[in-house]
Image (cartoon, rainbow, N blue to C red):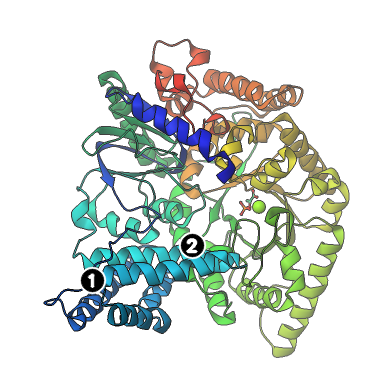
Amino acid sequence: MSGDAAPLEGVVADRTRSEERDERVLNGIGVAPGIAIGPACLYAASGEPDEVEARSLSGEETVGEEVERFEEAVGRAEDELDTVISITRQKLGEESAGIFEAQRLMLRDEALYEAVVERIRSEAVNAGFAIEAVMREHRQRIEAGPSDYLRERAADLADVQHRLVRHLRREHLLASVEPGSVVVAEDLSAADVVLFSRRRLRGFAIDRGGATTHVSIIARALGVPTVAGLGDATGPIESGDPVVLDGLRGEVVVRPTEARRERYHARRARYQRQRDEQKNLASLPSETCDGHAVRLSANVEFSQEVRLLDECGAKGIGLFRTEMLLMMRGDVTLSAESTFETYKDVVEHTAPQPTTIRLLDLGGDKMLPMAHREDNPFLGWRGIRVLLDKPEILKTQLRAILRASAFGPVRILVPMITQLEEIRRVRAFLEKVKGELRAEGTDFDEDVPVGIMVEVPAVALQAGPFAEAADFFSIGTNDLTQYVLATDRGNDLVAGGYSEFHPAVLTLIKRIASAARAAEIPVSVCGEMAGDARATPLLVGLGIDELSASPTYLPEIKRVVRAMDQSEARALAGSALSMQSAEEVTARVDEWLRARAADIMRFLDADAETTAPATEATAPAKEERPMPEPAPNAEEL
Ligand code: PEP
Ligand code: MG
């Protein structure tokens, strides 16, 4: 990215020069749904730790006193993290609290602690400078190292550094934000989000990040509307500016016009009403008008989220991502017992509906539990490739899943399958583990189905033989799209070219669905596309019978399902397959939905009520959002 810094700087400078005090619309990624309206509160902490000037200690400031100040700051930071840990444990569960426990340990890490004390003593400098210097050196060493996992830890270290310096200054995090405001920040730490949640903040607008960062995951789990990846919200927004934030559309409007503010109040009321109606909706069948059932299941990352299944009308878990268990714990060792306990809890809660547990999908954008660096991690050692090379990790999980299968229906989902041989090897390994459990007399379900993530184009192209080898398919549209379009799913600079609505992606989905039908195995979609209500008619029309998405999105999806005919959806999908671009498909789908599910479209597209021509009023689809650079006319609306 560094090579492109100059043009981006130019944009920022231009924007600063032409900054006006009238309305501005900023586009990012909606990472936690909901609508927040309130005054902005600019929060200064950023990914870069505060600078602290070096100061030689004068006569009155003895070295001993400075060391004491440092020790007190460590004590206060510990108290604060204890609070974060207890709130997190209470609201989100044990595994999420793990990330903060790791940070708490860093505070007393001998190498760091002693180095700071030593620096204060030997150089007779202020504690702030010593903390900065020691932590910075340590972070730089880690960041330069070959391990992705350790680089993740460098981010934790930066959080710890911030926290210590703030406590040294005796600044309170919560004192710096106004209750009832929308926090606007360049970056936030996951701990900040947890602490802020006590201040009844209305939302978070963050320059950096994307849907899968810790911050986004925590904000979503806490139910605080959040837009991330805004690029430069902190530029045009000032504290006190009125702001509306739309966590569904990924939009932040600063200094909204009176008319827009009114529309957003109405939209928020509608959103609230929809949420209230959710309860009634949860008990209604997920069925098209012409009687075709579409199963809706949940994507879950924390065991705590299983509470949401019933209220959102989820029929089981279609994707339990297990990487978060490791990432949140900040610990790379996979404890057999705690893995089993977590799986068992989730399976018991979800029974009699099935829980689909995905084997660890390490590598790519997720950490690897060993020092390792690759030029092309998304094309490298990830998913099942890692597990087959590290049988001890595979075995721990398979044992835990099989043991959990004694407590409710379970399905095993294998990530990043590319070769048929990989499925055969997993099955053989599974049989070995079953044999061991039998010999021990441990109960498990002998018929646990083994399905595969279809996220590599090769599998889609050879879907027939793969459908014969697997018990079910789950289409990972996030990866499938990035591989089909050769467009990094996490790179802001090419986000405009990333779209699941691209006819090439749709063609592969159709192919996968047809192969599954021919082999009589279930097929679902579990990528972000499944949670996008705009994609529902396309997916159903392409032959997908199950959608698995974050539970909060399911009521909206069900509404769309109940407002359409399967036969018409098929015709829509058929026409989309012959189109030439994602934009063409998106426009057609919006038009189609507007005619059939007007209430949904009004909701998805707040500006449908404006006087703009209907076809122009469409909210930019996720893939069209200009990031990080705002399109000039996006501000006009
Ligand atoms: C996907 O690739 O669509 C998917 C669901 O897996 P992940 O996002 O965890 O890679
Ligand atoms: Mg994937």
Residue extending farthest to the bottom is 440
Q: Is residue 192 left or right of residue 313?
A: left
Q: Classify residue 102 by image quadrant.
A: bottom left
Query: Where in the figure is residue 504, as x and y percent of width and height?
Result: 75, 33
Q: Nearer the viewer, residue 223 or 386?
A: 386
Q: Position of residue 403 (x, y in %)?
A: 63, 77
Residue wearing tag 1: 56
User: Which numbered disc flags the more N-terminal residue, 2 or 1?
Assistant: 1
Q: Residue at x 65, y 24 (%)?
A: 585
Count every numbered label the image shows and give the total.
2
For the residue pair 610 and 449, the one nearer the viewer reads as: 610
- Name the residue at 63% across, 23% down: 583
Q: Secondary structure at mark 1?
A: loop
Q: Label 1 amino acid? A: Ser
Q: Is residue 287 left or right of residue 61?
A: right
Residue placed most toward the observer, 311 or 61: 61
What x and y, as percent, mark residue 85? Answer: 34, 70
For residue 302, the mark is: 2
Horizontal side of 449 relative to 499 (left or right) equals right
Seen in the picture, residue 489 relative to 375 is either above or below; the reply is above
